[in-house]
Amino acid sequence: MAFTERDHALFRSRLTECLSTLGKVLTDPDFGTVAPTLGAELEFSLIEPDGRPAPLNAAVREDSRDDRLTLEVARFNLEANLTPVPARGRPFTDLAAQASQVLANVTAAASRHHTVAAIPIGTLPTLTPADLTARALTDLPRYHALERAWACRRSVPFVLPVGERDLVRAESVAAQGAACSWQVHLTVAPDLFHRAFNAAQLATGPALAVAGNSPLPLGRSGWQEARIPLYEHGFGDRVAPGAGTRGPRVGFGHGWMRGGPLTAFEEAVRRYDVLLPEVSSEGRNAPGKWPALEELRLHLSTVWWWNRPVYDPIGHLRIEFRALPSGPTPLDMAANAAFLTGLSVFLTADRRDIAEELPFAHAKENFYRAARDGLRASLWWPTPEGAPREHEAAALVEALLPRAREGLALLSVDADETDALLDLLHHRVATGRTGAWWQQRAREALRRPRPPDAGRPERRDPGGLAELTVRYAELAAGAAPVHTWQLPALPSRSQR
């Protein structure tokens, strides 16, 4: 579908109407009164037996017969929209069980297409620039519309940072296939929303530091979470003829949220022009009591903040935590989600607003330091004395685990679930063995010279990336948390 300027003008008019309606909804005492829930979206890749990406998402989804699966932007990606669960009890175990079931079902379906596995990983190490061209774009109207919208808005290709000094030029939004996330949703009451959102912004730094799982973008050595800069450049607005330079549509934000949840939606409309001006032809109301606001929801789906506000016409607001990487295992992802959720809730307790305790620039700096350096990052944190202090991320996470425990208790998460998941993170921090650590060390091991009969021929996998990816997939399917994974065995000195 090709959109005209009239389509854009009508859509902008509808956005203004949506904001006015949302303002009225947020004043209704019945809106947002549901008990807290948690949901998640899991993005993952499909790989061939040799670890290369398998561009078979449509066929595998059809064979899996799982309605929770949707096609992602690149043909080797899928996304599972897990069923939301109550936040009380054992929500993270429930989400992990759903994720495990989805991955197992998809792997079974993929095997019928000679594809070895569904692999939950932030950035697939075996990807090459040739895998991210327009040929890799999933054949859906939304993705073709995004491709056309970006072609009109940029005068040069995307430049993707894929290593300390390496840059790759990309022509297609299929480049987004190199970044897979574990996106967690938490419902929040409207009167708590701005404080909870600010808390989530601060909590994301240490949570990302301990969750790193994307260190090998396109086979190069990069940040611990190289998915972050890759994603930002892959969906960043570029120069449009006659329109000047636009700001990136992916990012950490511009400041603390103040003035209630409506301000976040207003900012998304004010700062970002329309990409997909598809005006709803149906009625303005959802089947239930609350308005659908379809144009506003569509527009927000094209603004990729790392923490994003979500309006749901079933009757609530959510914060979508978008920064956590996919993988390594559902158990690891459950622990990451528990820490980020619990810490965010703790930082919101007793009507606390973290915006009064720390400059926004420090929280933003934390985010990118955590993505770059992982557990070795230096992160800012507020102190009772008032002046923020810097801490090594590993020590800070250890100190914050009890705070996350308190936050999960406020949500009525079962104590044994909390203990198990936060203890897993304690061991990950104590060993330093994140998913990123394992991938980096495994690559070092697999790049060392081996005798001719020791595994895959060197000439076919010179960087060890294919073997690394296959071993990662096998270990991820085994379900043991990443801090327990063994590195590939090295040949003895007598064999070298």
Image (cartoon, rainbow, N blue to C red):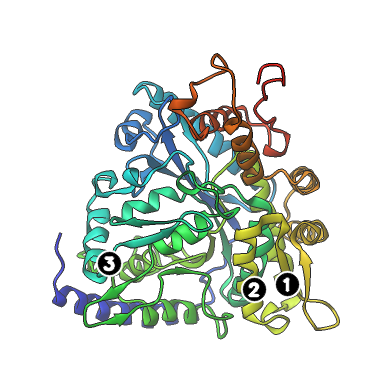
Q: Amino acid at mark 2?
A: Ala
Looking at this rendering, what residue extends furthest in the right direction? 385
> Would residue 93 be visible to someone looking at this image?
no
* Front tag of 3 and 1: 3
Depth check: 54 or 15 in front? 54
Seen in the picture, residue 165 relative to 76 is either above or below; the reply is: below
Picture residue at 62% right of the left edge, 79% below the top: 361
Give the residue at mark 3.
156
Look at the numbered discs 1 and 2 and tell me whether their residues touch, using CB distance below 8 Å.
yes
Q: Residue 266: x, y in percent?
A: 42, 81
The answer to whether 311 appears left or right of 441 in the picture is left
Q: Residue 136: x, y in percent?
A: 29, 44
Q: Secondary structure at mark 3?
A: loop
Q: Amino acid at mark 3?
A: Val
Please state, as top left, top right, bottom left or bottom right, where the C terminus lies in the image: top right
Q: Which mark is residue 380?
A: 1
> Would residue 426 be visible to someone looking at this image?
yes
Seen in the picture, residue 9 relative to 408 is either above or below; the reply is: below
Q: Secondary structure at mark 1?
A: strand
Q: Residue 317: x, y in percent?
A: 51, 67
Depth check: 340 or 292 in front? 340
The answer to whether 133 appears left or right of 106 in the picture is left
Tell me how far mark 2 sits from mark 3, CA to CA. 32 Å
Category of crowding for the residue at label 3, using alpha-carbon neighbours closer than 10 angstroms: few (below 14), some (14–19), many (at least 20):
few
Labels 3 and 1: the sequence-earlier one? 3
Q: Residue 66: x, y in percent?
A: 40, 35
Depth check: 116 or 60 in front? 116
Look at the numbered discs 3 and 1 and tell me whether their residues touch, using CB distance below 8 Å.
no
Q: Secondary structure at mark 2?
A: helix
Give the residue at mark 2.
363
Tell me how far mark 3 sits from mark 1, CA to CA. 36 Å
